[in-house]
Image (spheres, helix red, strand yellow):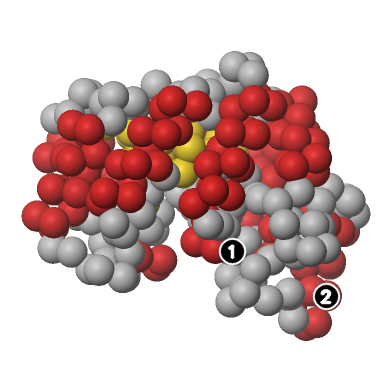
């Protein structure tokens, strides 16, 4: 259902730390003009963890308004509270989102049965296509392939964003339930390997600054032009790695600022990029002619 180059879009703030709607609308236009297939607001890269409830809703609303049905919008509505995730998801449906992205509950560290019951409750409560999001480095636990395969039985659970870094785990999901659930890469540097085993695309950080390049690589892989895709993957590897020299979204937001796209402001406990990292980032951006 959702495939191709999908951007986990940043949430720009102004100098007073408030949501910068004008810059956000411009970022969305930049993505659509450069071929991005899906916009994903309020993910990790969108700093959902430090948006209050009203801000979270407003960011999603502005995204839906600006996109205006030109491409799908998958709203980040996950939470470590099942009830809150349901509420956010239902409101996103009312606002017109095409789907929701649901990060695994963080901090609670539920069992695999707890994860299953969490997502089961969401699937039964919200009549909207749902994308599971497994990111152990952020949540403190891995959702196993077995749990994902169980959840694939729900018709409205349509995909999983796999950011476990484990190609074998993604392969197991595809081998057992590839006809029921799509796998999407959650790591730019693993998009090509995952697409080689059957993934349908990426929810990308790097696409914030290089949307045309990410789209070109994903399209090449989807069309079976593997030599072209491999060449582009290797060419972009240093850029993908640079996006994680500090905690996401600090590097990508700093890069977007250096490109004149939006401010670099992040919210505490995130802080501006450290000087040594900033110099490394500038070197990489110059290499790719982004600044």
Which of discs 1 and 2 lies nearer the camera? The answer is 1
Q: Is residue 11 visible?
A: yes
Name the N-terminal-most of marks 1 and 2: 1
Q: Quadrant of residue 240?
A: bottom right
Which label sits on residue 96? none
| Residue ranking furthest to the front | 54
- Residue name at image x 83 percent, y 75 percent: 279
- Residue name at image x 28 percent, y 24 percent: 127
- Residue name at image x 53 percent, y 23 percent: 72
Left/right placement of residue 2 relative to residue 68 reads left
Q: Is 268 placed above or below 192 here?
A: below
Q: Is 147 placed above or below 120 here?
A: below
Which quarter of the rendered picture does the N terminus lie within? Answer: top left
Q: Is residue 232 or residue 31 the one in the foreground? A: 31
Image coords of residue 244 (percent x, y):
60, 66
Q: Quadrant of residue 232?
A: top right
Which quarter of the rendered picture does the C terminus lie within? Answer: bottom right
Residue that mark 1 sits on = 248
Q: Is residue 232 visible?
A: no
Mark 2 is surrounded, within 10 Å at the Cα level, by few (under 14), some (14 to 19) or many (20 or more) other residues, namely few
Image coords of residue 274 (percent x, y):
74, 81
Which label sits on residue 279? 2
Question: How many numbered marks are there?
Answer: 2
Disc 1 is placed on an element classified as: loop
Left/right placement of residue 242 relative to residue 248 reads right
Image coords of residue 114 (percent x, y):
13, 56
Q: Is residue 4 or residue 227 the one in the foreground? A: 4
Q: Is residue 24 or residue 169 the one in the foreground? A: 24
Image coords of residue 195 (percent x, y):
43, 37
Left/right placement of residue 110 relative to residue 289 reads left
Mark 1 is surrounded, within 10 Å at the Cα level, by few (under 14), some (14 to 19) or many (20 or more) other residues, namely some
Disc 2 is placed on an element classified as: helix
């Amino acid at each position: 259902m959702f495939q191709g180059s999908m951007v986990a879009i940043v949430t720009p703030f102004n100098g007073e730390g408030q949501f910068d709607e004008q810059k956000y609308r411009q970022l969305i236009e930049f993505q659509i003009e450069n071929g991005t297939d899906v916009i994903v607001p309020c993910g990790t890269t969108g700093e959902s963890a430090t948006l209050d409830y009203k801000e979270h809703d407003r960011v999603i609303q502005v995204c839906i308004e600006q996109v205006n049905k030109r491409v799908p919008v998958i709203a980040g509505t996950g939470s470590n509270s099942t009830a809150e995730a349901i509420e956010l998801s239902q409101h996103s449906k009312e606002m017109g989102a095409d789907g929701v992205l649901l990060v695994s509950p963080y901090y609670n560290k539920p069992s695999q049965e707890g994860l299953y019951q969490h997502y089961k409750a969401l699937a039964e409560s919200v009549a909207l296509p749902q994308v599971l999001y497994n990111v152990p480095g952020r949540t403190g636990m891995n959702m196993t392939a077995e749990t994902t395969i169980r959840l694939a039985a729900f018709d409205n659970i349509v995909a999983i964003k796999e950011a476990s870094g484990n190609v074998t785990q993604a392969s197991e999901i595809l081998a057992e339930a590839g006809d029921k659930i799509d796998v999407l890469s959650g790591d730019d540097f693993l998009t090509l390997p995952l697409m080689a085993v059957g993934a349908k695309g990426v929810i990308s950080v790097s696409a914030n600054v290089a949307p045309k390049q990410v789209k070109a690589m994903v399209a090449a892989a989807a069309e079976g032009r593997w030599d072209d895709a491999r060449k582009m993957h290797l060419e972009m590897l240093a850029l993908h790695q640079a996006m994680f020299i500090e905690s996401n979204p600090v590097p990508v937001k700093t890069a977007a600022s250096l490109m004149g796209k939006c401010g670099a402001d992040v919210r505490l406990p995130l802080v501006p990029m450290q000087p040594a990292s900033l110099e490394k980032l500038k070197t990489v951006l110059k290499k790719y002619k982004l600044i």
